[in-house]
Image (cartoon, helix red, strand yellow):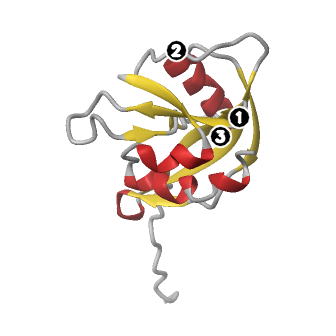
Amino acid sequence: MPPKQHVKAQRSRKVIVAAVIIADGRVLACERSAPPEVAGRWEFPGGKVEPGETDQEALARECSEELGVRVEVGDRVGPDVPLAHGRAVLRVFAVRLLEGDVPRALEHTSMRWLAKDELDSVHWLPADKPIVAELPGLLI
């Protein structure tokens, strides 16, 4: 009789991607409009990676949907941030707006461009705080 094998069904974690958009030494912060428990808190724009998408493709799509802009996705910013008790992970990338594109708050209550000394002027979502800590070196 063959030995019993313990097979652990490994569910893949959801990946959430977000954009650090920097222009003129300032980073774009977006105010959540929903759901109610996070409305009024601030985040970097982004969203879920859908099946079949790369992180970069998902982030370009999310920037188009949320901000109405085309972007070039660059390097990672900070480490993966665990979400939902480890069932999801936040991955953040530096993003460059393509020439002439100007972000609009299509899915957020408002947006602000924050300089290095203004990073603490908004109430960030907990998941975004580790990324905010990485920003002073990027904002020159």
Q: Is 104 drawn above or below residue 19 in the view shown?
A: above
Residue corresponding to mark 3: 55
- In percent of the image, x 56 and y 54: which residue is there? 131
- In percent of the image, x 71 and y 34: which residue is there? 95
Of the numbered discs 3 and 1, the one sitting upstream in the chain is: 3
Q: Is 65 drawn above or below residue 74 in the view shown?
A: above
Towards the viewer: 35 or 61 = 35
Q: Is label 1 in a helix, a strand or a loop?
A: strand
Question: In this image, 12 relative to 115: left or right?
Answer: left
Instruction: Give the amino acid at mark 3.
Output: Asp
Question: In this image, 128 relative to 99: left or right?
Answer: left
Of the numbered discs 2 and 1, the one sitting upstream in the chain is: 1
- Quarter of the image for residue 107 reads top left
Residue density around tag 3, few if under 14, some if 14–19, many if 20 or more, within 10 Å: many
- The percent position of residue 72, horizontal first and vertical second, equals 76, 28
Residue corresponding to mark 2: 104
- In percent of the image, x 40 and y 39: which residue is there? 42
Towards the viewer: 10 or 39 = 39
Residue density around tag 1, few if under 14, some if 14–19, many if 20 or more, within 10 Å: many
Task: Single out the mark in the foreground, 3 or 2.
Answer: 2
Instruction: Give the amino acid at mark 2.
Output: Arg
- The percent position of residue 111, horizontal first and vertical second, equals 46, 26
Q: Are marks 3 and 1 in contact (CB under 8 Å)?
A: no
Question: In this image, 45 relative to 69: left or right?
Answer: left
Residue corresponding to mark 1: 95
- The percent position of residue 140, horizontal first and vertical second, equals 75, 45
Q: CA distance from mark 3 to mark 1?
A: 12 Å
